[in-house]
Amino acid sequence: MRRVSFCEEARAEFDEALAFYTAERVSLGEAFVAAVESATQRAQRHPESAPVIRGRVRWMHVERFPFSVFYSLVDDSIRVLAVAHERRRPFYWFSRR
């Protein structure tokens, strides 16, 4: 199974969303973590099943939340480029590697 790594900006986006949901309700923050983990695990199990949206970047919806995980396949790993809110600036993260 491929290893998953987050770029610095994607990790910061994840942390920011987690802080928001945890402030609303601790269990909501926990659910967000579980949903992002589920999305990255789906990407690990079936890395090429997610649609390519631009270049070599693929996306996986985070269930129950208005977020998507955008990633690319790099050698034997999955590089998460963004944990992006689906209703905000599309492709703002596209220059990331």
Image: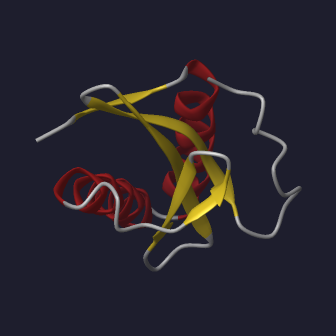
The residue lying furthest to the left in this view is 1
Q: Residue 3's spot in the image, x, y percent?
A: 22, 31
Decide: is 13 above or below 53. above
The residue at the point 80 percent across, 70 percent down is 87
- Which of the pair 53/15 is nearer the observer? 53
Residue at the image point whose x is 52% and y is 30% from the top: 11
Looking at this rendering, what residue extends furthest in the right direction? 89
Quadrant in the rendering for residue 36: bottom left
Left or right of 57, for residue 55 = right
Residue 93: x and y, percent?
Answer: 76, 38
* Left or right: where 64 falls relative to 27: right
Q: Nearer the viewer, residue 10 or 45?
A: 45
Task: Provide residue 80's location: percent of width, then percent of height.
Answer: 48, 37
Q: Quadrant of residue 24?
A: bottom right
Query: Does 39 appear above or below 87?
Result: above
Q: How many marks?
A: 0
Residue located 84% across and 61% down the image: 88
Please name the residue shown 59% across and 64% down the image.
67
| Percent x, y of residue 57 | 58, 48
Image quarter hosting the N terminus: top left
Question: Image quadrant for the C terminus?
Answer: top right
